[in-house]
Amino acid sequence: MPELPEVEALRGFLAEHLVGHEIVRVLPVAISVLKTYDPQVTALEGRPVTAVTRHGKFLDIDADGLHLITHLARAGWLQWRDRLPDGPPKPGKGPLALRVALETGEGFDLTEAGTTKKLAVYVAQHPGDVPGVARLGPDPLADTFDEAAFAALLDSERRQIKGALRDQKLIAGIGNAYSDEILHAARMSPFKRAATLTPDDIHTLYEALRATLTDAVARSHGVAAGRLKSEKKSGLRVHGRTGEPCPVCGDTIREVSFSDSSLQYCPTCQTGGKPLADRRMSRLLK
Ligand SMILES: [Zn+2]
């Protein structure tokens, strides 16, 4: 799933390719991706793109005051097309979900692989009209997101830190991969309760969060849309690397189930050498 750094790279890429150009067609191929019906997608046609912004993991294409907003979810992606095919796309075939064409003959496709359809597209007068955008917590790379702001967010937080970091309502843009990376960089157990963090812990975690995301954004910057996924994977140190050696200490990276998926961590770096108990498994065995 694309997270803040990849969405930020896509934003930069789209800003470069779309701003100043006119949208001539918007074709929802999989109707289910459209989450709004008023204004209609056709209202975007004939409008120039004036800006491309990001809200958490949402991309926001501003077409002269009308917004085309998308959340790529787990299996969604954006494919830039230097030249779109002449004929209309066939509905129900392949991963194509929505096509946007410019007056230049260029455009992009939003695609979604697999059978779980979570890719979402909205047309809105204001970004805040999209419920998922309205609920977002602060952006962790914003200038105003300093250590005091981070500490204030965690102050009344009762959950484990892994769950808190990937909650979009608390902090916008961090998902399963970068929360694993941030906690590894901070040498902190993913199961640590947020409320038990000391000021030193919060300082360490804040520094790890900013450094991890800033590095990932810098790495992704300017990378073509088609190569972003492999670029993301190559930069991850523990996430998705179960069984591989930790690049810091050489211990074997382990995996444990968490929420609706699993997380990866290094026991030596993060949990005093002790493997975390798989709660789902131990619950089953009781
Ligand atoms: Zn390690």
Image (cartoon, rainbow, N blue to C red):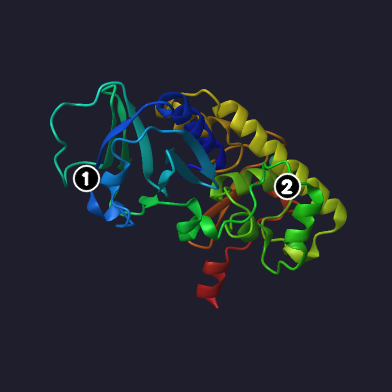
Residue 80 vertical placement versus 134 (above, below): above
Front-lying residue, 163 or 35: 35
Image location of residue 201, percent across then percent down:
82, 53
Q: Which residue is mark 1?
A: 29
Image location of residue 230, percent across then percent down:
46, 30
Q: Which residue is mark 2?
A: 145
SS at circle 1: loop
SS at circle 2: loop
Label of residue 247 in the image:
none
Q: Quadrant of residue 218?
A: top right
Image location of residue 158, percent across then percent down:
70, 69
Q: Residue furthest bottom?
A: 286
What amino acid is found at the position of numbered circle 1 in the picture? Answer: Val
What amino acid is found at the position of numbered circle 2 in the picture? Answer: Phe
N-terminal of the two: label 1 or label 2? 1
Image location of residue 166, percent across then percent down:
59, 55
Residue 102 shows in this picture: yes
Q: Quadrant of residue 32?
A: bottom left
Front-lying residue, 261 or 282: 261
